[in-house]
Image: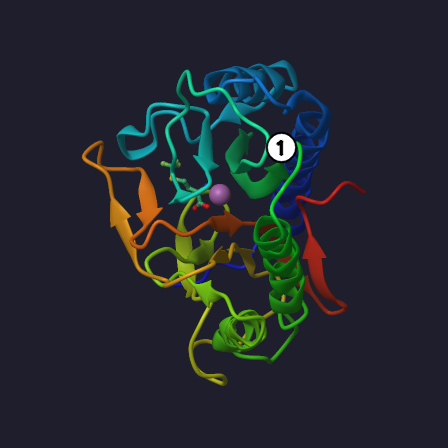
Amino acid sequence: MIIAKSRHEIQLMREAGQVVASCHEALRSFIREGVTTMQIDRFVEDFLTKHGMIPAQKGYKGYPYAACTSVNDVVCHGFPSDYRLRSGDIITVDMVALHKGLHADSAWSYGIGELSETASRLMQVTEQSLYIGIEQAVLDNHISDIGHAIQTFVEGQGFSVVRDFIGHGIGRQMHESPEVLHFGPPHKGPKIKKGMAFTIEPMVNTGSYECTVDDDGWTARTADGGLSIQYEHTLVVTENGPDILTKLA
Ligand code: MF3
Ligand code: CO
């Protein structure tokens, strides 16, 4: 069942989303060569907590940290560690804030120092694919129109879209209906209606879309060792189109 959000719920999700967006903005100057991914996790946990939010990923299904820090070949759910970022690395930081019972979820990516041509193009293409997907989040489109637009664009750029992890409805639960695939045919699945809130969060690989998961049960990597990047927003659908809750107002 897809739960339409009330005005009050949307307001709370927006407040949570603004804190998440400010945290990502602050990370832009915090993240640089020599910083460890554990320091990034601390930064995220402190930032969310200081702004009155619960870092909702921590403890979710046993995930141990406030942030997912996914470096280079890590697709998503990378564990923070004592790894020090180096020039040329690319990292996706994913976080969820829980505020008065409502969630906001956003992942953003950061490049360290001098990036390869491929790495910087991967970041640009993935961010653009997110916005191309968001453009499809309009009344009476089908949910699968989002993924179709993302896949068409990404594959046209010579990259691939991960199949194993998808976007999701969000609200009182971190993960609700509907499922939001980032690939597939158009005009399938539920129609997009006013008040629906969901994430769009394409993970894009330079090589094959296939992934493996480490023995820790979380860290997902590209099967072929290629690079992977993710961008994610939480949005709500209005009569006037998608309203991105995790973008700074
Ligand atoms: N933020 C993630 C998402 O985009 C959820 C990560 S799983 C967790 O759906 F366990 F880390 F929370
Ligand atoms: Co997320």
Can you say which quadrant of the picture contains the N terminus?
bottom left
Q: Position of residue 85 (x, y in %)?
A: 53, 25
Mark 1 CB in 8 Å range of ligand 2?
Answer: no
Figure check: 48 above or below 24? above
Quick check: 75 left or right of 120? left
Figure check: 19 above or below 155? above
Q: Which one is nearer the viewer's eye here, 114 or 51?
A: 114
Q: Which residue is mark 1?
A: 112
Q: Which one is nearer the viewer's eye here, 14 or 206?
A: 206
Q: Position of residue 133 (x, y in %)?
A: 60, 67
Quick check: 55 left or right of 210? right
Q: Position of residue 226 (x, y in %)?
A: 41, 52
Q: Residue at x 64, y 50 (%)?
A: 120
To which quarter of the image does residue 90 belong? Answer: top right
**Which residue type carries mark 1?**
Ile
Q: Residues within 10 Å of mark 1 (few under 14, many from 20)?
A: some
Q: Which one is nearer the viewer's eye here, 21 or 34?
A: 34
Q: Position of residue 6 (x, y in %)?
A: 61, 52
